[in-house]
Amino acid sequence: MAVEVRPFAASLGAEIAGIDLSQPVGAADRAALTRALGDHLALVFRDQALTPEQYLSAAEVFGPPMRQHYSQHNMEDFPNIGLVWHRNGQKPAEAWHTDHTNREKPPAATILYGVEIPSEGGGTSVANMRAAYLALPEAERTKLRGLRTVNTLDDTHDDTRPEDVEKFGVPIVHPMVRTHPVHGSDAVYFHITKTKHIEGMTPADSRAYLQDLLDRIIEPGIAYTHQWRKGDVLVIDDRATLHRAHGDYDRSESRVLWRIIVEGDRPILVQ
C-alpha cells in the first residue's frame, strides 16, 4: 500500500496511512514523506508499535538522529532517544518553542512517540510559522528579515549536565526568518528562551520584543493540537513551526513520550 496523506482541516497537519514504521520504508515512500512534512508541517502516524531500535530506524526517514543536549533525560541504552516524562523531574514545555536552536544545524524535525498516555489532557500543539509570517504587516516582515538571534542553552533548566553546557552552550547566530529547504517558503524562526539576544538589541529588549511577537502571531487559526493516543507518532517540522506541550493532565497518571530529533540544515534566508 502506497503512502496516503490525509490533510487536516487545520492550517497544518496530515494523517499518514499505509505506513508501518516498524518495517523498512522504501525510497519512494521516503521521498513522499519528506515532501508531505514540508507541505503539511506535522504528520501523524497512528497505531504504531515500536521498539527503540525500530523507532530510531523509522526516524531515519526524516534525517539521522541527533544527540539531545539534556542528556540526563536520554534513554540509557539508546542515548539518541529522549524520555519526556514528568516523573523524572521534567516540567511540561508549555511555552511555544522550536527545538535546539543552539545548534549550528538545528533539527529538521522533532519526532514524538506516545508510549503512555493520560486519560485526559496532555496534548501537543503545533503552530504554523509560515502562516504567521505571511499574516504580519509588510513593514514588520521586512524588519524581521534583517534580524538575527544569538542562541545558546536556555537558563530555565537547573539540572543540565556541565558537559552539555560546555559542548552545546557556545553562542550560535540564526536569522529570524528562514527559508524552508524543501518547500521554499519563509517562516518566522526563533526560540525565545534560547535567544540570548537579538543582534543590536539588549537581552531585555530582545525578550520583550520576542514575547510581544509571540503574543501577536500565535492564533487558533494557525495551530493544531494533537490529542495523544497510545501508539501515535507525531513528526513536527522544526523549520517552520513552533510547538508546545499541555500540562493539563492528572500527574498521578503517566505521560511518556519518546523523543528523537533529526539532523537539519543551517538556517538561511534566501533574499
Image: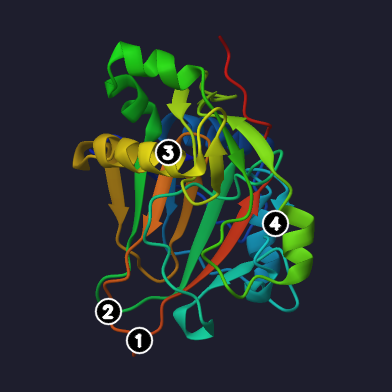
Amino acid type shown at disc 3 = Asp
Secondary element at image label 4: helix
Residue 7 visible somewhere in the drawing: no
In the rendered structure, find residue 253 and report the number of the disc placed on it. Answer: 1
Tag 1–tag 3 contact (CB < 8 Å): no
Tag 2–tag 1 contact (CB < 8 Å): yes
In the rendered structure, find residue 205 and report the number of the disc placed on it. Answer: 3
Q: Residue furthest bottom?
A: 252
Tag 3–tag 4 contact (CB < 8 Å): no
Q: Is residue 165 above or below residue 109?
A: below
Tag 4–tag 2 contact (CB < 8 Å): no
Q: From mark 1 to mark 3, how far is it between C-alphas?
A: 40 Å
Label 1 or label 3, whichever comes before in sequence order: 3
Amino acid type shown at disc 4 = Ser
Residue under pointer 2 = 119
- Given residues 265 and 233, the one toward you in this image is 265
Residue 265 at x, y = what percent? 68, 33
- Given residues 91 and 208, the one toward you in this image is 208
Instruction: State which mark lies toward you, 4 or 2.
Output: 2
> Callout 4: 10 Å neighbours few (<14), some, many (20+)?
some
Amino acid type shown at disc 2 = Ser
In the rendered structure, find residue 57 and report the number of the disc placed on it. Answer: 4
Q: From mark 3 to mark 4, how far is it between C-alphas?
A: 43 Å
Residue 17 at x, y = what percent? 43, 48
Label 4 or label 2, whichever comes before in sequence order: 4
Instruction: State which mark lies toward you, 3 or 4.
Output: 3
